[in-house]
């Protein structure tokens, strides 16, 4: 009886260790193995750059057509641009979930599945330099529907437009713009 309990305990421990080991990320995976544009990496790098440069921004927040504007230095660009970073489409499960179309200097990633949050990602480059990014996000379930349009023009403007419809509470619109000086 003792040996039976011990072998069951050892087997369970072994299976648990195998499960934990299989959950680790592949250390050989790198940014170069990403299939699509690295939105997350781009905005992490640009957030670090903007934090270092600390530019003066004219920030306007509009909620349901009521604007409020002020000139500010953004203390945490990572938080300020987090919606952009969260629109990353380079998840292994999504490798075949987007159609890619390239014309001239514009690359368009379009979701094949209407249930994916990031539905469209449009990137314009010029001379291998990013000129602008447009992201369309959409989420819908029985309780609410969110639509986001995120625009980013490096060193010029970022714009977040959001429409949120909650079944019981109604519809709210938000617009956040940051104009670089």
Image (cartoon, grey):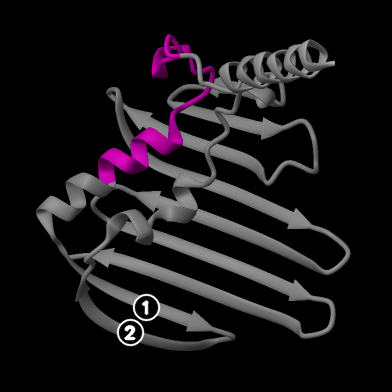
Side (left or right) of 73 relative to 149: left
Q: Quadrant of residue 19?
A: top right
Q: Residue furthest right?
A: 142
In this rendering, is residue 126 above or below 60? above
In this rendering, is residue 50 above or below 169? above
Kindly check if marks 1 and 2 are in contact, taking CB atoms under 8 A apart as contact.
yes
- Give the residue drawn at x 39%, y 43%: 132
Q: In which quarter of the image is residue 169?
A: bottom right
Q: Position of residue 107 (x, y in %)?
A: 52, 27
In this rendering, is residue 176 above or below 131? below
For the C terminus, give its image quadrant.
bottom left
Q: Residue furthest left?
A: 53
Q: Quadrant of residue 165?
A: bottom right
Question: At numbered mark 2, what does the secondary structure look like: helix, strand or loop?
Answer: strand
Look at the image and say whether residue 37 sits in the magenta stretch: yes
Look at the image and say whether residue 43 sits in the magenta stretch: yes
Side (left or right) of 116 relative to 48: right
Q: Where is residue 179 in the image (x, y as percent from the top left)?
A: 28, 66
Range shown magenta: 27-46
Q: Which mark is residue 60?
A: 1
- Give the residue drawn at x 63%, y 40%: 120
Q: Position of residue 40 (x, y in %)?
A: 43, 38
- Give the residue drawn at x 46%, y 49%: 84
Side (left or right) of 108 relative to 39: right
Neighbour tally class for label 2: few under 14, some 14-19, many 20 plus, Cα within 10 Å: few
The span from disc 1 to disc 2 (Cα, nearest Å) is 4 Å
In this rendering, is residue 114 above or below 100? below
For the N terminus, give its image quadrant.
top right
Q: Disc 2 marks which residue?
A: 69
Q: Where is residue 170 in the image (x, y as percent from the top left)?
A: 77, 83
- Give the residue drawn at x 66%, y 80%: 172
């Amino acid at each position: 009886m003792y040996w039976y309990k011990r072998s069951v305990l050892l087997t369970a421990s072994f299976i648990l260790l195998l499960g934990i080991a299989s959950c680790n990320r592949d250390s050989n995976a790198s940014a170069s193995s990403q299939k699509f544009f690295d939105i997350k990496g781009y905005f992490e790098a640009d957030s670090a750059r903007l934090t270092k440069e600390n530019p003066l921004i004219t920030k306007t927040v509009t909620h349901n057509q009521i604007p409020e504007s002020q000139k500010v230095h953004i203390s945490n660009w990572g938080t300020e641009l987090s919606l952009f970073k969260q629109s990353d489409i380079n998840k292994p499960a999504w490798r075949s979930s987007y159609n890619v179309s390239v014309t001239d200097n514009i690359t368009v990633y379009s979701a094949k599945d209407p249930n994916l949050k990031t539905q469209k990602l449009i990137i314009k480059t010029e001379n291998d330099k990013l000129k602008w990014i447009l992201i369309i996000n959409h989420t819908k379930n029985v309780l609410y529907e969110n639509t986001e349009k995120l625009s980013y023009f490096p060193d010029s403007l970022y714009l977040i437009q959001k429409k949120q419809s909650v079944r019981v509470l109604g519809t709210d619109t938000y617009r956040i713009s940051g104009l670089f000086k």
